[in-house]
Image (cartoon, helix red, strand yellow):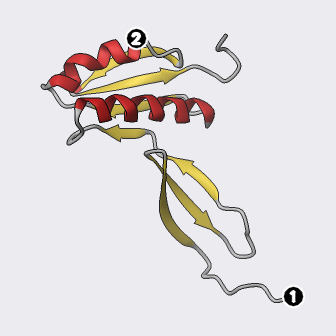
């Protein structure tokens, strides 16, 4: 059985549920290893879409055992005003820290198995 010819390293991006994964294929490797990005930028989203994206991003970070994520909301606007309410209601968030004078937030995600 012949193996397909692949370049030594190939980087490409794919989107799954709004989370971008960086995939890297190596020679004779048939399973790409995902690297989950830990930053979500909510600029340009409506408030409903931003709420959905935020919850999906937090859940995907929890599933992939990511400890810290950063979500950029901007320093003003409806999303920035509602963001703290969204995060306080989310059961996967352990801690919230304000960065850039309220323009972005750093979230600590709970470990898997600690949610009841």
Q: Which mark is residue 13?
A: none
x, y (%) of residue 73? 24, 30
Is residue 85 shown above or below 48?
above
Q: In which quarter of the image is the N terminus?
A: bottom right
Disc 2 versus disc 1: distance between alpha carbons?
Answer: 54 Å
Is residue 55 shown above or below 40?
above
Is residue 12 shown above or below 72?
below
Element type at marker 1?
loop
Q: In which quarter of the image is the C terminus?
A: top right
x, y (%) of residue 43? 22, 40
| Residue at the spot 38% in from the left edge and 32% down from the top edge | 52
| Residue at the spot 43% in from the left edge and 11% down from the top edge | 89
Q: Nearer the viewer, residue 45 or 106?
A: 45
Give the quarter of the image for residue 39.
Answer: top left
x, y (%) of residue 75? 15, 27
Q: Which mark is residue 1?
A: 1
Crowd rating for badge 1 (residues with CA inside 10 Å; few <14, some 14–19, many 20+): few
């Amino acid at each position: 059985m012949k193996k397909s010819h692949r370049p030594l390293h190939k980087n490409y991006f794919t989107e799954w549920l709004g989370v971008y994964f960086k995939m890297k294929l190596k020679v004779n490797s048939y399973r790409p290893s995902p690297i989950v990005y830990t930053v979500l930028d909510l600029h340009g989203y409506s408030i409903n879409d931003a709420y959905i994206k935020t919850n999906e991003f937090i859940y995907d970070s929890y599933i992939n055992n990511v400890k810290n994520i950063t979500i950029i909301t901007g320093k003003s606007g409806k999303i920035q005003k509602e963001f703290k309410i969204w995060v306080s209601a989310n059961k996967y968030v352990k801690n919230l820290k304000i960065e850039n004078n309220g323009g972005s937030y750093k979230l600590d995600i709970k470990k898997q198995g600690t949610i009841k």
